[in-house]
Image (cartoon, helix red, strand yellow):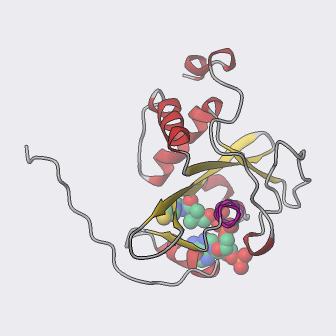
Amino acid sequence: MEDLLARSQVPQTPLLSHVTAGTGAAGGRAVRDEAQGSQEPMNGIVIRNGLASDAVAIARLLGDLGYPSELASIPKRLESLAADGRTVVFVAEQSGDVVGLATGQAFSAIHVDGEGVWLTSVVADPRVRRRGVGRDLVAAVEGWALARGCSRISVVTGLHRADAHSFYERLGYALAGRHYKKSLAPEA
Ligand SMILES: CC(C)(COP(=O)(O)OP(=O)(O)OC[C@H]1O[C@@H](n2cnc3c(N)ncnc32)[C@H](O)[C@@H]1OP(=O)(O)O)[C@@H](O)C(=O)NCCC(=O)NCCS
């Protein structure tokens, strides 16, 4: 499958917003800023923008998250997210392997000024959990949000994700409501 996405066939430049995140409350000690060079990560984890060439790893991580995805869909999704200009996709890299994923999606609303950010698709490879990958990814999205001038960030997490609940609470997130959903697709 890797052959389908041979490096020569996919863009090597970041498809998504440039990273300026990674300071202050957001931490993000390992965020790589292409314009300023890499920072030496303290824990061996480098956070960088997701690329089409990461598609194999991203598809695997989405599967770990419970959203099995066709490999061929990933570059298209990255491209579409990049085009909206309000989304960032970060991956975590450790020893050259992509071991984590998180996205941030900024949105506007009528009831408040400014943008808020949804934290979405946060996942660490099961083989490297509890080593700071999730924390660094969330810090990178928070840093990106702050750099855009957003001071509100929210995440929706399934009731069954007990690990994620502990994780977000450890990172300072507070339970703030209920999440309802409904399918609008016609019934078969
Ligand atoms: C949730 C998830 C992303 C956490 O990633 P991670 O890399 O293992 O988390 P970290 O190592 O960065 O942990 C950060 C903090 O949260 C705590 N934490 C992480 N997982 C925890 C768990 N299962 N129970 C209790 N605390 C936990 C860590 O101990 C750490 O706190 P510390 O710094 O005080 O030690 C990971 O477990 C995962 O991918 N889960 C499956 C997908 C998922 O549910 N994603 C969330 C979707 S909304």
Q: Residue furthest left?
A: 188
Quadrant of the image for the C terminus? top left
Quadrant of the image for the N terminus? top right
Q: Is residue 179 above or below residue 132?
A: below
Kindly identify the residue that appears in the image at 68 percent across and 67 percent down: 146
Q: Is residue 124 above or below residue 38?
A: below
Dividing the image into four quarters, tell me where ligand 1 lies: bottom right
Dominant secondary structure of the residues highlighted in magenta in the image: helix
Q: 129 or 20, which lies in front?
A: 20
The residue segment tinted magenta is 135-148
143 magenta-colored:
yes
Kindly identify the residue that appears in the image at 82 percent across and 48 percent down: 33
120 magenta-colored:
no
The answer to whether one can see residue 121 in this image is: no
Kindly identify the residue that appears in the image at 80 percent across and 73 percent down: 24
Kindly identify the residue that appears in the image at 16 percent across and 48 percent down: 185
Q: 49 or 54, which lies in front?
A: 49
Instruction: Identify the image quadrant of residue 11.
Output: top right
